[in-house]
Amino acid sequence: MHDAPPAAGTLTGDKEPLSGGLKQRHLTMLGLGGVIGAGLFVGSGAGIAVAGPGIIVSYLIAGALAMLVMRMLGEMSSAMPASGAFSVHAERALGRWAGFTVGWLYWFLLVVVLAVEATGAAQIANGWVPSVPQWAWVLIFMVVFTAANLAAVKNFGEFEFWFATLKVGAIVLFLGLSLLAIFGVLPDTSAVGLSNLTGQGGFLPHGWSGVVSGVLAVVFAFGGLEVVTIAAAESDDPARAVGRAVRSAVWRILFFYVGSMLVIVTLLPWSSMQPGKSPYVAVLDHIGVPGAGQIMNIVVFVALLSALNANLYGSSRMVFSLAERGEAPRSLLKVSGGGVPRRAVLASVAFGFASVILNLEWPDSIFHYLLNAVGAVLLFVWGLIAASQLRLRRRIEREMPDRLTLRMWGFPYLTWVALAAMGAVLVLMLTDEGARPQLLWSAAATGAVLLVAGLRELRLRRAR
């Protein structure tokens, strides 16, 4: 059994009791593949519909914010690797209440989204094999990935490595074919020029308000990068591994996202995009790739299973870290001989199963409220990450400067810029009729967790 980490006033801690089976290639591909999912392959159509070609600017803004957050996370995690990552950082920087709040919020986010991914993958599989009901596919996926996460952590790493490789390969192939079509190199194609970028109302057909709406539509697609800093604690050299993974991931992901949007709005009129329909399928159909819809179904299917696997891993490590610090039941601290927190995995997947049942039985009522309750949680988590980095940077420089192997750019100014940008997105969500319910429900969920954290603090003070 592992003792709880040091109190918030100190920075150094004991070595994690978890397995060290993740290799650098696992972390690098986890960083690349963690955010390449259905939000990009399908959800990007909604962003194009509201921003037009200006969606390129929307992705640049949202991607820049995600890069700043990841740089902050990389700085703290390379100096102080821990299975709870930003939850541990928040506790050390701001106090127990912050670590408790960000840890449980993130766990809640992951297990609810896990149900969405399992259901989405099951819907695709049911379309291929209608004789197997959707609930059975959900059960199969949950059992397979639970088994993979209960085994050695290298199994999770291998699953994610190959899933991410397939997703990255699909995007690279898509970009290559699209560029050939843009320049008229492919059979039955001619150079398209810039007509789709400058026509149909121009590059910003809805003005800057369209770009802002596009940011709201795409910013949450960058969620998932955080898992790489959680996984780094189970690598052979956590400090070095997380730094390399963060450096390689952020630029390449921004290239994939912005590059994809650029070729899509160059090849096709933005007005032809429909929310809920994959713009990738539209481009492949335009190029003349046979079976484009089924090809993209396979890619989205892999992306959903990859995200399910990563979220189950991330949620189990987060609740394990909370248990280490006395913020979750101590029974979750049981670690297998191979260094896997099996009870934490089972606790996370149990809530995942419950969420799936809610989704199957009441998709428009209870599950709808659960989804709304996590809609803006990512921004709250990012905000606490930035606040933690502001506090911890000076202390790391003072107490252990040799561990600052990866530094946040333009500190502290860019950290404040990131916080201001998050605040602006929250204000925009409040003024947007479609996003407002998500913000209010997420704020209510956050308030509930903060209330519990405050009551715990009060009880601990009385006990002292």
Image (tube, helix red, strand yellow):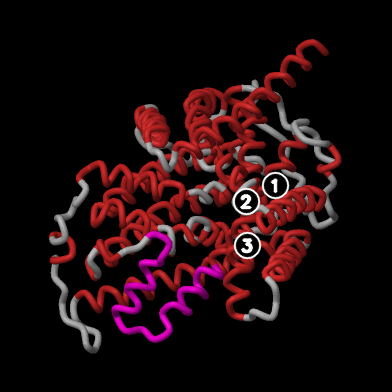
Q: Residue at label 3?
A: 119
Residue 231, which numbered label? 2
Q: Earlier in the sequence, mark 2 or mark 3?
A: 3
Q: Is residue 292 above or below residue 321?
A: below
User: Is residue 8 found inside the magenta-colored segment of the image?
Assistant: no
Give the secondary structure at mark 3. helix
The stretch of residues the image draws in magenta is 275-302
Residue in front for this viewpoint, 451 or 404:
451
Residue at x 54% of width, y 46% of height: 226
Q: Dot 1: within a 10 Å radius of its alpha carbon, few (fewer than 14), some, or many (20 or more) residues?
A: many
Q: Position of residue 301 (x, y in %)?
A: 55, 70
Q: Position of residue 8 (x, y in %)?
A: 66, 24
Residue in front for this viewpoint, 393 or 455:
455
Q: Are circles 1 and 2 on residues that touch, CB within 8 Å?
A: yes
Residue at x 54% of width, y 38% of height: 377
Q: Main secondary structure of the magenta part?
A: helix
